[in-house]
Image: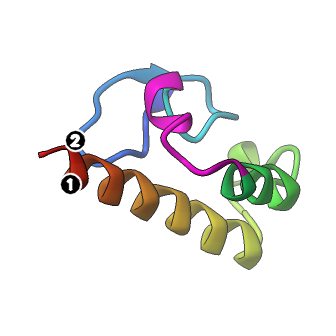
Amino acid sequence: MHKCHAQGCIVEVPPKMLMCRRHWFMVPKPLREEVWRTYRPGQEIDKSPTAEYMLAQGAAVSAVEQREAERR
């Protein structure tokens, strides 16, 4: 298990998952699809994600940060 990648979130999620359910569904659907499209099975084990995945992952985290800032 690891913590959700959303800034400040302490919810534990399985290694294959990027975020907790609450934060994952704050990510726009096309971007969620891009995260899954670029995910390489086993990358959480060998710690070697693709550059494309890292870009999608970073964009997803940024999208959540933006949505949370809009709520304040």
Q: Is residue 3 left or right of residue 20?
A: left
User: Between 64 and 13, which is closer to the camera in this rendering?
Assistant: 64
- Report the span colored magenta: 21-29
Q: Is residue 67 above or below residue 12?
A: below
Query: Nearer the viewer's eye, disc 1 or disc 2?
Result: 1
User: Between 65 and 1, which is closer to the camera in this rendering?
Assistant: 65
The residue shown at (53%, 58%) is 60
- Residue 16 position by quadrant: top right
Counting from the top left corner in percent of width and height, residue 2 is at 47, 31
Question: Circle 2 is placed at which residue position?
Answer: 8
* Mark nearer the N terminus (1 vs 2): 2
Q: Is residue 44 above or below residue 66?
A: above
The residue shown at (74%, 56%) is 30
Q: Is residue 15 above or below residue 49?
A: above
Q: Is residue 43 left or right of residue 14?
A: right
Q: Is residue 8 above or below residue 1?
A: below
